[in-house]
Amino acid sequence: MGICDICGRKTKTRKVRIEGAVIEACYKCVPGKERDVVEKKRQCKPKQIKEEDVVEQYNKIIKTAREEKGISVEDLAKKLNISLSYLRHIEKRDMIPDKKTAKKLERFLNIKLFEEIIVEEEEDVSDKASEAGFTLGDQAEWE
Ligand SMILES: [Zn+2]
């Protein structure tokens, strides 16, 4: 393990020669074997991962859709073969439905319980924190 001199990641690095200087570089910045990489000097882009996340108001969406269909929690649990107490917990927002259950509910109630979120690997935490602080302060001013 080392620290990449190009992107600053703490990762597996080895010495490479760039523009005559020998530096530590990771395999993302400098793929392959040691060689001169004058042209390839660049920043590692953070890896973006798409993830599905259950929406915030899932319990309300489920409850509303169920009531619109005019069926009880008991019937819904039976129809979808999920535990009644589990479904009750979900509607009360005590529990987040697992993917399988959520998919069943989506299909049966014709609702959307997932949203796609983009997660960046190795986020800069300090950056996010200052962003959040700015937003909060900004809002306070308008109140
Ligand atoms: Zn790197």
Image: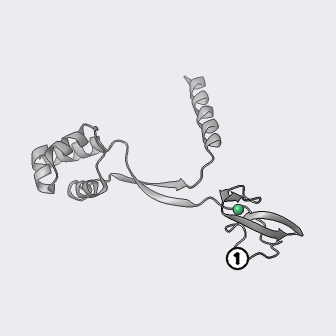
Q: Say above or below: 20 vs 90.
A: below
**How crowded is the residue under tag 1: few (<14 C-alpha within 10 Å), some, or many (20+)?**
few
Residue drawn at x 66%, y 63% is 12
- Picture quarter containing residue 26? bottom right
Residue at the limit of the structure toward the right, as seen here: 20
Residue at image point 28% right, 45% down = 61
143 or 120, nearer to the observer: 120
Rendered location of residue 132, percent (x, y): 58, 36
Q: Quadrant of the N terminus?
A: bottom right
Quarter that holds the C terminus: top right
Q: Point out residue 17 in the picture as x, y percentages from the top left corner.
A: 83, 70
Q: Residue at x 77, y 75 (%)?
A: 34
Q: Quadrant of residue 94?
A: top left
The amino acid marked with disc number 1 is: Gly
Visible in this render: residue 72? no
**Helix, strand or loop under label 1:** loop
Give the colour scheme shown: one colour
114 vs 109, left or right, is right
